[in-house]
Image (cartoon, rainbow, N blue to C red):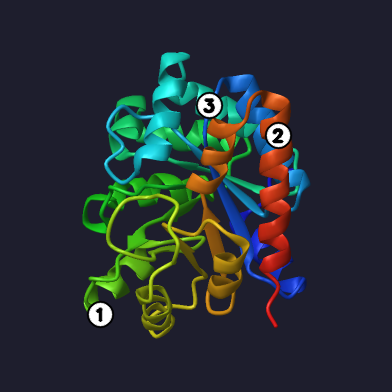
């Protein structure tokens, strides 16, 4: 049975913590391994997983995720593979989302993508480079299949812009902790809490913070003011550094467990 984004947030709140949302590109380092690694994250307590659709020009992503996307593409990963990864993990207690640049969804066919994602047991999609103004048909396609459609809010956004992003998002709003690309950083960025506070003034939709969150300490800091904590590059980095898939599985499970433990609010 598909777990919805709302159910995932509700389950985390019931445990007195923020939801942990992990990211991993489909097909990295290959399709079977990506399924194995995602299931290990979920077994360790991750609440939601963003299955990245590998893309040749991921403008929002830093070098770590770019390298993972290259490896996945070299192994032949496709948009259809991402949907199959979702399907293979849809029997877990986590909500399964896709994260995709719009070109890939447009090439696949937005209505078809929404239908196939729903059929695979997916809960929604994050579209980092699609603006609400250009996303009205996508919102309709997603709503028709009861899928979350998540847009990004930036620290530089004015109040009216934040209102538009919040009103256009279903499931949660993705609050970018800083201006820049994804990656492991020593600090989350002082703008994240302010951005979440500003979003709280315009919406009751859950807000999850991403970009730069990589350690349990940072997850604990973000969990104190946000509904969700998004971690991507830190998982990918561990896989890239692991000598084999068995070690990678243990490493991502360890990180997932640390993040979940840190997500409990004091």
Q: Identify the residue position indicated by label 2 in the image.
A: 249
Q: Considering only vertical position in the picture, is 38 above or below 20?
A: above
Q: Considering only vertical position in the picture, is 202 above or below 254?
A: below
Q: Position of residue 71 (x, y in %)?
A: 45, 22
Q: Which mark is residue 221?
A: none
Secondary structure beneath disc 1? Answer: helix
In front of the other: label 1 or label 2?
Answer: 2
Residue 1 vs residue 159, the one in the foreground: 159
Q: CA distance from mark 2 to mark 3?
A: 12 Å
Q: Position of residue 115 (x, y in %)?
A: 50, 34
In front of the other: label 1 or label 3?
Answer: 3
Secondary structure beneath disc 3? Answer: loop
Residue 118 in view here: yes
> Is 204 positioned to the left or the right of 169 in the image?
right
Q: Give the class, few, some or many, for how many residues have Cα within 10 Å of label 3's Cα (few <14, many ≥20).
A: many
Q: Is the Cβ of the residue at disc 1 closer than 8 Å to that at disc 3?
A: no
In front of the other: label 2 or label 3?
Answer: 2
- Residue drawn 41% across the image and 50% down it: 183
Q: Give the class, few, some or many, for how many residues have Cα within 10 Å of label 2's Cα (few <14, many ≥20).
A: many
> Is 44 positioned to the left or the right of 87 in the image?
right
Residue 174, by quadrant, is bottom left
Q: CA distance from mark 1 to mark 2?
A: 42 Å
Q: Identify the residue position indicated by label 3 in the image.
A: 28
Q: Which mark is first along the chain, 2 or 1? A: 1
- Residue drawn 49% across the image and 78% down it: 204
Q: Give the class, few, some or many, for how many residues have Cα within 10 Å of label 1's Cα (few <14, many ≥20).
A: few
Q: Identify the residue position indicated by label 1 in the image.
A: 159
Q: Position of residue 114 (x, y in %)?
A: 46, 38
Residue 88, by quadrant, is top right
Q: CA distance from mark 1 to mark 3?
A: 38 Å
């Amino acid at each position: 049975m598909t777990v919805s984004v709302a159910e995932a947030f509700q389950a985390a709140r019931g445990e007195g913590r923020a939801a942990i949302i992990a990211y991993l590109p489909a097909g990295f380092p290959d399709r079977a391994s990506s399924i194995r690694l995602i299931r290990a994250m979920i077994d360790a307590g991750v609440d939601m997983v963003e299955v990245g659709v590998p893309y040749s020009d991921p403008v929002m992503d830093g070098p770590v995720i770019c390298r993972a996307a290259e490896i996945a593409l070299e192994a032949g990963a496709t948009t259809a593979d991402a949907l199959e990864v979702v399907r293979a993990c849809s029997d877990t207690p986590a909500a399964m989302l896709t994260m995709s640049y719009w070109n890939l969804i447009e090439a696949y066919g937005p209505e078809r993508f929404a239908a196939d994602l729903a059929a695979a047991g997916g809960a929604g999609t994050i579209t980092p480079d699609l603006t609400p103004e250009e996303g009205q048909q996508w919102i309709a396609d997603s709503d028709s299949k009861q899928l979350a459609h998540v847009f990004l809010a930036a620290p530089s956004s004015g109040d009216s812009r934040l209102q538009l992003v919040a009103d256009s998002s279903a499931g949660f709003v993705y609050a970018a902790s800083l201006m820049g690309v994804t990656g492991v950083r020593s600090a989350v960025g002082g703008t994240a809490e302010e951005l979440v506070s500003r979003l709280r003034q315009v919406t009751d939709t859950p807000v999850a913070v991403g970009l730069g969150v990589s350690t349990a300490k940072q997850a604990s800091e973000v969990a104190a003011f946000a509904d969700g904590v998004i971690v991507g590059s830190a998982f990918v980095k561990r896989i890239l550094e692991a000598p084999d898939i068995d070690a990678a599985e243990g490493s991502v499970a360890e990180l997932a467990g640390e993040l979940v433990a840190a997500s409990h609010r004091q």
